[in-house]
Amino acid sequence: MLVGRTRTGKSTIKSMLANPMVVAEEDKLMVGTKYPQFETFHVAVRKKIPTDESSEDVFEDYSSEDDSSEEDLSTTESPEDLVLNIIDTPGLFERGTDEITPRDNDIIMRAIDVYANQEITKVHVICFCVAMTVGINELDIQALKLLLKTMGDKIASNSCLIITHCESKDKKQRKSIISQLKEDKEFELIRPFFKMGIFFSGVLNRDDYKWGSENLIGQYLTVSKYRTKLIKMFRKTVKPFPLIDTLISDSKRACDNQKSTALELEQMEMKIRHANEDLKHIKHRLQEKEKELNETQSKLENTQKELRKKDADLEELHTLFLFYYILFSLAEKLMTMRSYHYK
């Protein structure tokens, strides 16, 4: 697993391991790796590594004061090519802040999720990368503390430090770098964490490649030996750090909880959408009923007006009937009186 701050050359290490003749990419304003990337590839290692007697020895083990087990890589036999499974993580502190954010912690957890999704239950080497061009500063210390907090102190046995952008550094310069690290009080606090050692890395300089500089030959020899040193370290018999019992289970649990929460939220959102649709439907029905009620009320008012008019007409007829009735009665009495008078 490659971990470190942004622009420390993590992706470049992966490219260099696949091909020592790779040329550095053009500088970019935007960060390259945005998501954890899992990649498996074969590393071609020649059975006998050529030795340049005049070249600087770049295989000094800087992880300890004495290393009697250091073997001569110029005669190292390689029975078969090495298969590497590499997780390349996005850079920590990508946004230029000097504070640890949930996103930084999420980067590591997402990288572990990638392992889990690939059914990888253990990791052999965790490479913490720093760039020679910017040195080790407080952000690197914080990034390492974040890594320890997330994955635990036990990963120290499987961890190493890789200093990148060192394709043009000779032995004297490398020793000077190590001396500076040993004298640095802040680095002294984290130095025990890199139990697998301190290594260098680099790629062919793009400007030198572009202009055909003679420096490319020295850079290639140096990068090739850096690569061989790293491959040798990868092939060491190291007890792998188990992820399945710790982080993957926690990661899977967190991932499952996140998926469960997301599913619940999705179901809740669906229920809310359905409720909103039902509410709209009910509102539409209420509007229709209100419209029907208004129409019925209007009809009722019209009917009441008609009834009142009919009542008025009936009242008028009733008055007219009474008038004619009285008139008829008076006429009948008058006729009776006349008949009696003639007799």
Image (spheres, grey):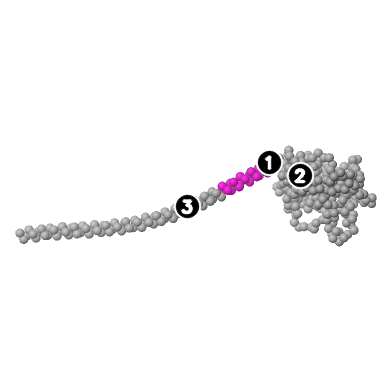
Name which quarter of the figure residue 144 lies in: top right
Check if residue 290 falls in the magenta segment: no
- In primary-sequence order, the first of circles 3 and 2 is 2
Q: Amino acid at mark 1?
A: Arg
Q: Secondary structure at mark 1?
A: helix
Residue at 25% of width from left, 59% of height from top? 316
Tell me the distance, in whole angstroms, between the alpha carbons under discs 3 and 2: 60 Å
Residue at 76% of width from left, 57% of height from top? 29
Q: Residues within 10 Å of mark 2 (few under 14, many from 20)?
A: many
Check if residue 257 falls in the magenta segment: yes
Q: Secondary structure at mark 2?
A: helix
Q: Is residue 79 left or right of residue 308?
A: right
- In primary-sequence order, the first of circles 1 and 3 is 1
Q: Amino acid at mark 2?
A: Leu
User: What label sits on residue 285 in the rendered view?
Assistant: 3
Tell me the distance, in whole angstroms, between the alpha carbons under discs 1 and 3: 46 Å
- In primary-sequence order, the first of circles 1 and 2 is 2
User: What label sits on residue 147 in the rendered view?
Assistant: 2
Nearer to me, 144 or 220: 220
User: What label sits on residue 253 in the rendered view?
Assistant: 1
Residue at 89% of width from left, 40% of height from top? 69
Name which quarter of the figure residue 331 lies in: bottom left
Residue 276 rendering spot, x and y as whole percentages: 54, 50
- Magenta stretch: give its range: 253-272
Compared with 325, 36 (above or below) is above
Q: Amino acid at mark 3?
A: Arg
Tell me the distance, in whole angstroms, between the alpha carbons under discs 1 and 2: 19 Å
Residue 299 rendering spot, x and y as whole percentages: 38, 56
